Amino acid sequence: MENLDNFFKCAFTVDNVIFGFDEGDLKVLLIKRGEAPYEDMWALPGYFVYQTEDLDSAANRVLAELTGLRNVYLEQVKAFGRSDRHPVGRVITIAYYSLIKISDYKINAASIARKASWHSIPTVPELAFDHNDILTACFKRLKRRVRGRPIGFELLPPKFTLTELQHLYESILETELDKRNFRKKILSMNLLVDLEETQEGVAHRPARLYQFDRDKYEHLFAKGFNFEL
Amino acid sequence: MENLDNFFKCAFTVDNVIFGFDEGDLKVLLIKRGEAPYEDMWALPGYFVYQTEDLDSAANRVLAELTGLRNVYLEQVKAFGRSDRHPVGRVITIAYYSLIKISDYKINAASIARKASWHSIPTVPELAFDHNDILTACFKRLKRRVRGRPIGFELLPPKFTLTELQHLYESILETELDKRNFRKKILSMNLLVDLEETQEGVAHRPARLYQFDRDKYEHLFAKGFNFEL
DNA sequence: ATATTTAGTGTATATTTTACACGCTGGACT
DNA sequence: AGTCCAGCGTGTAAAATATACACTAAATAT
């Protein structure tokens, strides 16, 4: 460890599975590759880690470049490093996933240039490199995490209905939930503020709007409270 | 991604948190550094990943070199890559933890040369590099994993008593468990074979010995069964 | 024989999870 | 104005699970 004998020309990248939720569906942002290898295939957004850059910063950078968003939920999942995973050289990638409010996603020059678009999770096509493996690992992590941390709200607009929240959980957990039991449980945590407003412009009885009380959660969490759905 | 512009001289290593269980205590195998940086400090066993080597293979290699053991439980946790984490150059490390039966640990030339020794988790000293962070992350992962997968058995000899098993869980979860409830739960899964043997040479009523039925677990798991303690 | 140490066992209570159906409310349509 | 439609909002009983708890049994040591 004390010398440079074992340093060689190699690279590491970060790949970021960017999740969004829209039209009752969990989606992931993919980009169309414009060059070999894997030209014209869909791939996860990723880029090289600069020499003096922390991994988390690199992941945030990739996210900001593509979506214009900062300070969003971002979590490292693991490293992927099969020695043959990249045809050009030895490239290890560190996989992250992030959760964004799809309505905040800003189409910018980079996202146009890289032909970014949203794909429903259940119908993601074959991806470049080992990106299907990476996506699977990140989705699995999200599935686990969402039950023990109140991160689902990262995917919803600030005001949401309980039905929207339920559909979000159903998409992520890939299961159906009972409406009454879901509401009982989520409301019993007292982390949602009833805004005493209702939806507008819907062709049926409008639902109440709620907001997640982050401060209250942080406070309870510090005292040992555990979110659990 | 298509060219080598972003390749630079760097390195990646694997660091392996090797857990063992002995005398009712969860332990970790540390080595005493023989050279700068961090000379004479305790550190996690780790080494460079060779240019054509998979990450998992490298982690297994580190483990085998030090302990002589192969085919043991090994799980990647995450990458650590603060740009200043290594004083000599840019070194990203991939953290693994492994679970071994401490009685199988073979003291060999490498472990003598690297001055390897076991340390109780609660009293681990300050470590080189960011190795305390790595240890913490791996321990946390183990804590979560051990409740949802039957991996605790990896740390015990093939024949064990229920009290030993309970103490193992107590060390990992850092909590006390109720003897009757623990037994009820673990036995109700029907994954333990009662060997109809008892301990020998103990100065008290000898306990029954059990064995984990791995085949049965695999079979049940394939059918959707979930271990849960 | 008796003291010491750890093994092994069951029940009652509290808590959590699950299953389940109908009236309400607003807009859309005619 | 009346009716239709779609999705909202609500409570209870039964089942399953988790928790709390204390004594007798079996071996060695003295």
Image: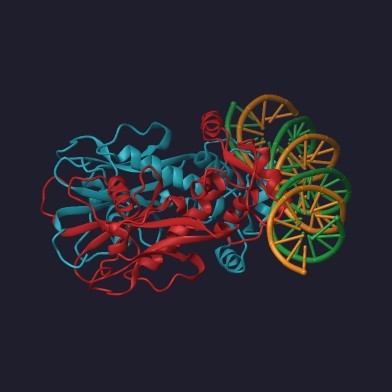
Chain colours: A red, B cyan, C orange, D green
Q: Nearer the viewer, residue A174 or A196?
A: A196
Q: In this rendering, is residue A162 above or below C15?
A: below
Q: In this rendering, is residue D28 above or below A15?
A: above
Q: Nearer the viewer, residue B14 or D27?
A: B14
Q: Indicate left or right for B6 with A157 as reference.
A: left
Q: In this rendering, is residue B50 above or below B35?
A: below
Q: Nearer the viewer, residue D17 or A135?
A: A135
Relative image position of residue B142 (x, y in whole percent): 46, 47
Q: In this rendering, is residue B126 above or below B144?
A: above
Instruction: Please name the residue shown 40% across and 48% down the image.
Output: A75
Could you tell me how many numbered marks the image carries?
0
In the picture, residue D29 is in which quadrant?
A: top right
Instruction: Please name the residue shown 42% across and 73% down the image.
Output: A125
In the picture, residue C7 is in which quadrant?
A: top right
Q: Indicate left or right for B62 with A205 as reference.
A: left
Residue A46 visible, this orientation = no
Residue A145 visible, this orientation = yes
Relative image position of residue A119 (x, y in whole percent): 45, 66
Relative image position of residue A227 (x, y in whole percent): 58, 40
Relative image position of residue A111 (x, y in whole percent): 32, 60
Q: Indicate left or right for A35 with B77 as reference.
A: left
Instruction: Please name the residue shown 62% across and 68% down the image.
Output: B223
